[in-house]
Amino acid sequence: MRFRIDLKIFIFIILFYFTKQIQIYGFIMFFACIHELGHLLCGILLGMKPEKLEIIPFGLSVSFRIKAQEYNKKIKKGNIFEIKKIIVAIAGPLINLIMILIIYNVNLEIEKKLVLIYSNFLLFIFNLLPIYPLDGGRIIKGIFHIIFGKRKAEKYINCISLISVIIFTALASILILYIENISIFLISLFLLCIVIQENKKFKKRETIYKKILDNKAI
């Protein structure tokens, strides 16, 4: 399994430090790691092999090895591997929900308990946004893949992700004026960059696919 650190994490640490939000950032990073370990454990239990572990500005990111033969095991219009991926995507937010319930029932100071619950609730809601590659986007993409097939699933989720991240960035820009919290705005910019990169990858794949079809037509 390969390991990588996204160097942008150091920029985020500096920004959160100077905006005096380093404590909440630390809690979010800690619970984001637990969240991602939920994905990892679930994937391993389902027989999937981890390929890459990456430290990113908001926790860990785990990717699993994709085998071509997995896509040949059909279930109706979909396949077993897509269902596994959907279950793995659900596992992360589910871990945060479980953490909220545990923290709620643990004897802690009210102020500390609220911060811990807030951190997990933020991760729970954030990861369920319909933006790929967040968990919400992965779940929707997996469902679309089962119903419409791979190409249409990628096309639809890219459109949904772009619209969602634009709305999210606009809301974050407004919220920063009222709650004076830069974290949500930074997250939105980070997501916007990821969505733009995913759209570029999709367009490259579409160009290659069209060339293959044109060659076959000739």
Image: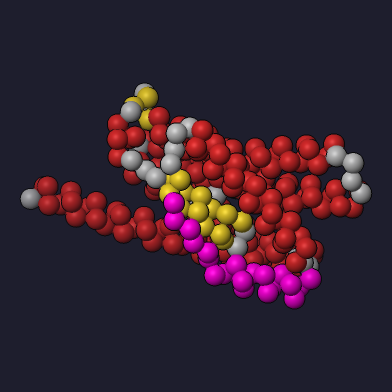
37 on left or right of 51: right
What residue do we see at 72% from left, 47% from top? 120
Give yes or no for residue 11 being in the magenta stretch: yes
Question: Furthest residue to the top?
Answer: 76
- In depth, the one of 21 and 51 nearer the eye is 51
When asked about the image quadrant of residue 59, the answer is: bottom right
Q: Position of residue 141 (x, y in %)?
A: 46, 42
Question: In this figure, what is the number of numbered marks?
Answer: 0
What residue do we see at 50% from left, 38% from top? 43
Q: How is the image coloured?
A: secondary structure
- In depth, the one of 108 and 19 nearer the eye is 108
Q: Which residues are magenta?
A: 1-20
- In depth, the one of 106 and 123 nearer the eye is 106
Q: Position of residue 201 (x, y in %)?
A: 37, 58
Figure check: 63 above or below 29: above
120 on left or right of 206: right
For the question of whether residue 163 can be seen, the reply is no
When asked about the image quadrant of residue 198, the answer is: bottom left
Give yes or no for residue 119 being in the magenta stretch: no
Q: Position of residue 65 (x, y in %)?
A: 39, 45
When asked about the image quadrant of residue 81, the answer is: top left
Figure check: 150 above or below 52: above
Q: Position of residue 145 (x, y in %)?
A: 40, 37
Figure check: 171 above or below 42: below
203 on left or right of 158: left
What residue do we see at 92% from left, 49% from top? 109
